[in-house]
Image (cartoon, rainbow, N blue to C red):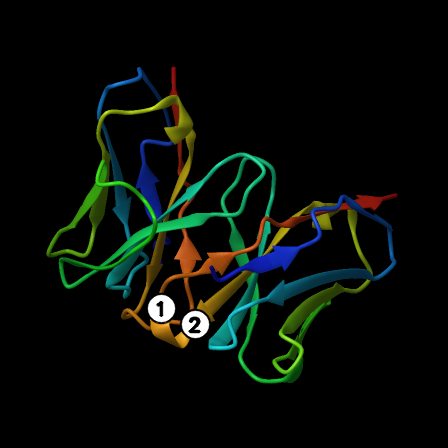
Amino acid sequence: QKEVEQNSGPLSVPEGAIASLNCTYSDRGSQSFFWYRQYSGKSPELIMFIYSNGDKEDGRFTAQLNKASQYVSLLIRDSQPSDSATYLCAVLSTDSWGKLQFGAGTQVVVTP
Amino acid sequence: DAGVTQSPTHLIKTRGQQVTLRCSPKSGHDTVSWYQQALGQGPQFIFQYYEEEERQRGNFPDRFSGHQFPNYSSELNVNALLLGDSALYLCASSLGVSGNTIYFGEGSWLTVV
């Protein structure tokens, strides 16, 4: 059973601070990694994707990938109340292209 | 540029009934996947359609079936509804079965009573 694990939270973050979200995956064949943001009652919204080891930055978001440790993370800098949402980690494997494997999500609460 | 559109947005069905959900993919996309998301869980893959054929299927019973039309739109059918089928049903589109950029529609909320 291929698994994607995330801490469920809630992760409470003061406004302006850095939120750090972690995700581990079990399938070593995983090739593509995604972070989705989901507001309550809404559908997932793609924030970032990363394929290669290292860091990838997009605005206030940085994704970090370490394939040897089977670990992907998301940093949110200068957290804003509008960042309060559930963040879903998702993984694509080479033997199941197009089939995203999701974690259960981490709830982030940014407090003013 | 139209995104992924789904209908209906909300519906209530009685146990044992059948439901059909519809999806139009993002402009330029030809592959549609369906996911089920129960409360407090991540989305679970149901199946994927490409070139009007089911290409991949997740661990869902045969009560869940689908179809893709020549214009790439898709339907998800669920027969003999159970209370446990109550969930948010998400349609996702991509370009090709190996498309790495996958976008979701707003979803269809199904409540089975």
Q: Quadrant of residue A24?
A: bottom right
Q: The residue under label 2 is which amino acid type?
A: Ser
Q: Are marks 1 and 2 in contact (CB under 8 Å)?
A: yes
Chain name for mark 1: A
Residue B109 in the image, given as x and y percentages of width and height: 41, 31
Q: Quick one: label 1, few (<14), some, or many (20+) residues within 10 Å?
A: some
Residue B42 in the image, given as x and y percentages of width and height: 53, 47
- Residue drawn at (31%, 44%) of the image: B60
Q: Which residue is mark 2?
A: A93
Q: The residue under label 1 is which amino acid type?
A: Ser
Q: Which residue is mark 1?
A: A96
**Residue A55 placement, left or right of B92:** right
**Up-down: is B85 above or below A24?**
above
- Residue drawn at (58%, 66%) of the image: A25
- Residue drawn at (54%, 66%) of the image: A34
Q: Are marks 1 and 2 on the same chain?
A: yes
